[in-house]
Image (cartoon, rainbow, N blue to C red):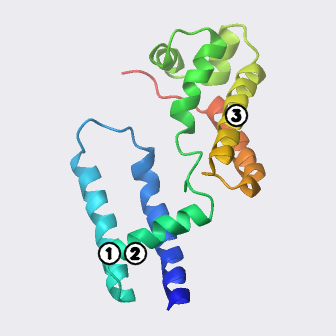
Amino acid sequence: MKHVLMAAGGAALLLLGALGVGYAQSTPAQTPTATQTAAKQRRQAIISDAASQLGVSADQLQQALTQARKNVGGRARPLADLRKDELQVAARALGVSDVKALRAQLAGTTLTAVAQTHNVQPSSVSAAIMSDITSKLQADVAAGSVNANQVATLTQRAQNRVNALMTHQWPASR
C-alpha cells in the first residue's frame, strides 16, 4: 500500500506541478480572479479524484504530497519567480530607480539594449543577476528547501533563463 501511495503521490505531484506552472507564474492579485479560482478548484478536484482512486482522503493525499516535496528537496520550482525578482537586481545594476522605471525603458527592446544605453556591459547585468540567484539557491540549500544535489542543475537552468531574460524582446508600451 505504501508503494502504491508513494507512486500515486509522485504522479499527482508531477500533475499538480504541470498544472500549477501557469498559475504560479502569474502576478499575484489582491483578490483571486475567476481564472485563478477555477484553477484552484481544478487542482482540488484532481487531488480529490486521485485520493478516491487510491482509497484515501484528499487530506491524506495532500499530506503525502507535502511530505514527498520535503523528501525530494522542498520547493517544486525554486526558479519560478526569476523574472520578477531579478528585474529588481537588473534595475540596481543599471542604476535605474525601480522595476517600474526599468519596465518603461524595456518597452519594445531588450535588457541587453537597455544595458548598452546605460553604458553598462550586458555581461555585468547578467553576472549580477546570477550572483543573486546563486546566493538565493545557497540560502535555500542551507534552509533545507533545495537539495544540494540539485544546485548544479538549477544553476544551469538559471543561467539559461537569465540569457533568455537578457535577450527577451519586451512588448512596446501601450
The local crowd at label 2, few if under 14, some if 14 to 19, many if 20 or more residues have their Cα within 10 Å, is: many
91 horizontally vs 141: left or right: left
Hey, which quadrant is residue 50 in on the image?
A: bottom left
Marks 3/2: CA distance?
Answer: 33 Å
The residue tagged with tag 1: helix, strand or loop? Answer: helix
The residue tagged with tag 3: helix, strand or loop? Answer: helix
Kindly identify which residue carries mark 2: 61
Q: Earlier in the sequence, mark 1 or mark 3?
A: 1
User: How far across and how far down the image is residue 58, in percent?
Assistant: 32, 75
- The reply to whether residue 169 is in sight is no
Kindly identify which residue carries mark 3: 135
Seen at 54% across and 69% down, the residue is 68
User: How far across and how far down the image is residue 120, in percent?
Assistant: 73, 12
Q: Amino acid at mark 3?
A: Ser
- Image quadrant occupied by the C terminus: top left
User: How far across and how far down the image is residue 55, in percent?
Assistant: 35, 89
The local crowd at label 1, few if under 14, some if 14 to 19, many if 20 or more residues have their Cα within 10 Å, is: some
Q: Amino acid at mark 1?
A: Ala
Whether tag 2 and tag 1 are in contact, CB under 8 A, the answer is yes
Kindly identify which residue carries mark 1: 58
115 horizontally vs 127: left or right: left
Marks 1/3: CA distance?
Answer: 37 Å
